[in-house]
Image (cartoon, rainbow, N blue to C red):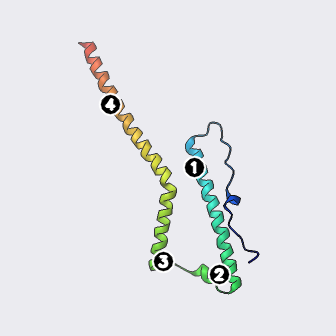
Amino acid sequence: MSGLMTYSPAKYFAEPRRSIPGEAPEIARLTAMTVALLQELAITRERLDTVERMGEAAGWLDRGALDAYRAEGSAEAERNATRKRLIEVVMHPFKADAGRALEQTRENAEQADRTRAADAILEKEQLS
């Protein structure tokens, strides 16, 4: 079958971008995630376009009917579950970072409490 688009992962992987002096690691991570998602979306769109064009050419796909389709019932539930899983996967690094930041904040607050308590004891001893 000549003329078909074939998926070649090596063709789609971007070169790592150069680091920007002073760039926060969180920004670099967010940029890398965004670029990876963009690459995946581009690949998916190209492949979907291929399927639509092949289906239309072969007579088994009507793009108008495809555009008009609305998922209902179990199809809608499956799509919602898939969307939820995708969001969880994409957002996992943010959730993990937020969890670590929360834990660090708690540790810092506990340390500050201990420091204040020690300072209060020292101040009492100095006044005595």
- Tell me the number on the disc at residue 113: 4
User: What type is the residue that disc 2 sits on?
Assistant: Arg
Q: Looking at the image, is mark 1 or mark 3 earlier in the sequence?
A: 1
Amino acid at the residue labelled 4: Asp
Instruction: Give the Cα distance between marks 4 and 2.
Output: 65 Å
Horizontal and vertical percent for residue 103? 39, 41
> Badge 3 is on which residue?
75
Percent across and percent down for residue 113 are 32, 31
Which tag, 1 or 2, sits closer to the chain's start?
1
Q: Is residue 73 left or right of residue 29?
A: left
Q: Which residue is mark 2?
A: 63
Q: Earlier in the sequence, mark 4 or mark 1?
A: 1
Tell me the residue at 62%/36% (across/down). Answer: 22
Q: Residue at x 36, y 30 (%)?
A: 112
Judging by the rendered image, the residue that carries numbered circle 1 is 30
Determine crowd level at label 4: few under 14, some 14-19, many 20+ residues with C-alpha closer than 10 A: few
